[in-house]
Image: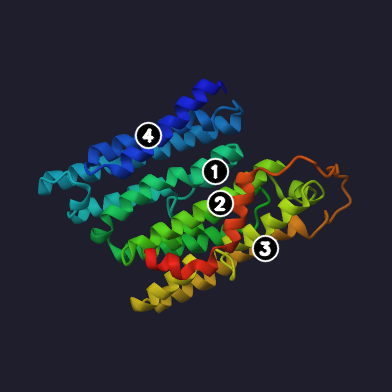
Amino acid sequence: MNPQAKLIFTISLLMGTTITISSNHWVMAWAGLEINTLAILPLISKSHHPRAIEAATKYFLTQAAASTLVLFSSMTNAWYTGQWDITQLTHPTSCLVLTTAIAMKLGLVPFHFWFPEVLQGSSLTTGLLLSTIMKLPPIALLYMTSNTLNPTLLTSMAILSAALGGWMGLNQTQIRKILAFSSISHLGWMTIIIVYNPKLTLLNFYLYALMTTAVFLTLNSINALKLSTLMTTWTKTPALSAMLFLTLLSLAGLPPLTGFLPKWLIIQELTKQNMALAAVALSILSLLGLFFYLRLAYCATITLPPHTTNHMKLWHTSKPTSSSISILTTVSATLLPISPLISTMI
């Protein structure tokens, strides 16, 4: 892709995100979401591969439907209450329609079907954008309307997302699909707590984005797209593979790594809200995710290919690891000791 075109699309992406998260009026928020969608489409389809074109088409149709529902929800609310302010969404039908629209935007169950397919059809860098920055505007809208949304509906969707995200990731061999189901599972954790402690949702999102960025950039650096190629990369960059191991375990939420912090705080908050059953369900369902993270980590660092098919062994590279990857992987593994400081900030 032409560098100038890529720059324009990236600036549009940042501008759309900024417009949505800083707006008070529903039409401005909707305009930001539309700019975001239109900016990411060329980045998804830039390889001109049929799979990429299919992914861009699926993404466009889903996001267009979700944006229509956002506009419909805000217009219904304005019709009944006369309010276009995002924080004044009070009509029950509008709240229900908005929850559906945000779930479609994010890829929450039962509107998750598009996300793994789109991620599989995109490159790793575009997949990183779809998993992190494209999730920020819908989560910002959820944050601003959290006090009027239906907690029972959000809790149901969250537990289903954690269950399906873990369950469907078990049998995958494509790394991008595994990371897509991982994202769906993490969104379940974010959604369940949004009504009770919205700041905790943002903290969870920031840490998730940090760890996912580290994983995507590492995979992009070692050029691994499926488990069979991941098995032979340890000879190329042993140190980076070791840090990938820790980052994946952090994403799984194992102590004493960074990813344990949001899970710990969310379970604590759910218990305070007399939702011990939901906390237990989420904790058990996170074991499904732990299985496929361990599988990825095992393939990345510990094992050799388990069959006799010839693999091209990669020479140990002398190229230094990017400093951004080094910083991200280190932070992804070591933030837990300063959790008291982080918890005082939320």
Left or right placement of residue 174 versus residue 312 in this view: left
Q: Position of residue 54 (x, y in %)?
A: 54, 33
Q: Are marks 1 and 4 in contact (CB under 8 Å)?
A: no
Q: Are marks 2 and 1 in contact (CB under 8 Å)?
A: yes
Q: Is residue 30 above or below residue 303?
A: above
The answer to which of marks 4 and 2 sits earlier in the sequence is: 4
Closer-to-camera residue (6/327): 327
Q: Amino acid at mark 4?
A: Met
Alpha carbons under labels 4 and 2: distance apart: 22 Å
Q: Which residue is mark 4?
A: 15
Q: Which residue is mark 2?
A: 212
Q: Which residue is mark 3?
A: 294
Secondary structure of the residue carrying tag 4 is helix
Q: Which residue is mark 1?
A: 128
Left or right placement of residue 187 versus residue 34 in this view: right
Q: Position of residue 113 (x, y in %)?
A: 49, 48
Alpha carbons under labels 1 and 3: distance apart: 21 Å
The answer to which of marks 2 and 1 sits earlier in the sequence is: 1
Q: Are marks 1 and 3 in contact (CB under 8 Å)?
A: no
Q: Amino acid at mark 3?
A: Leu
Closer-to-camera residue (32/105): 32
The answer to which of marks 3 and 4 sits earlier in the sequence is: 4
Which residue corresponds to the image point at 17% horizontal and 54% vertical from the top-left? 91
The answer to which of marks 1 and 3 sits earlier in the sequence is: 1
